[in-house]
Amino acid sequence: QVQLVESGGGLVQAGGSLRLSCAASGNIFSINAMGWYRQAPGKQRELVAGISSGGSTNYPDSVKGRFTISRDKNTVYLQMHSLKPEDTAVYYCAAGEYSRSWYFYYWGQGTQVTVSS
């Protein structure tokens, strides 16, 4: 099992920045990828950033150029710039495997990000 603990969410004005952190513990040798998902009310959960142990990253067009994922040992970060009201969501840290595709098996409890207009 892998445990994930997120921090760094909050309220920010449009155009502002936030940095999310996620610390992984437990059987971390079973994973080679970490990422961030988000879920807004009434919408499906969507991947916003993924990073593999080899450094491969993945971003959807909606956040490309504004969000940056990075990893330092067992902690993954999501730096968010130029935030928009539509970025408002609960952000979940995820861990799993990258092998041509991304597979996430473990989830954090989520942290709320609210962007006011």
Image (cartoon, rainbow, N blue to C red):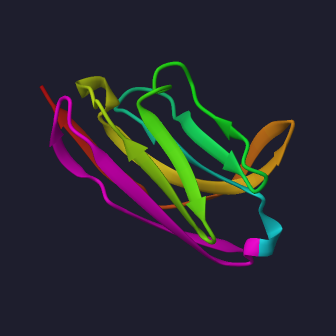
Query: Relative to residue 50, is residue 74 depicted above or below?
Result: below
Quadrant of the image for the C terminus?
top left
Q: Nearer the viewer, residue 84 or 17?
A: 17
Image quadrant where residue 58 sits: top right
* Residue at image point 76% right, 45% down: 103
Is 36 placed above or below 93 here? above
User: Which residue lies most toward the bottom here?
Assistant: 26
Give the image location of residue 67, x and y in percent: 44, 36
Rendered residue at 61%/71% (across/down): 74
Picture quarter with the N terminus? bottom right
Q: Residue 23, how many percent across, how many down?
A: 52, 70
Residue 66 counted in the magenta span: no
Residue most extreme to the top: 61
Magenta residues?
Answer: 1-28
Is residue 7 highlighted in magenta?
yes
Up-down: is 111 above or below 17? Answer: below
Q: Is residue 17 left or right of residue 62?
A: left
Say which quarter of the image contains residue 86. top left
From the top left corner, tell me how far across and down residue 92 is, in percent: 48, 51
Q: Is residue 56 left or right of residue 22?
A: right
Is 21 above or below relative to 84?
A: below
Residue at horizontal 74 percent and vertical 78 percent from the top: 27
Residue drawn at the location 81% of the way across and 68% of the way down: 30
Residue situated in front as seen by the camera: 105 or 96: 96
Q: Percent x, y for residue 3? A: 59, 73
Q: Main secondary structure of the magenta part?
A: strand
Q: Nearer the viewer, residue 56 or 94?
A: 56
Figure disc tally: 0
Q: Is residue 98 left or right of residue 75?
A: right
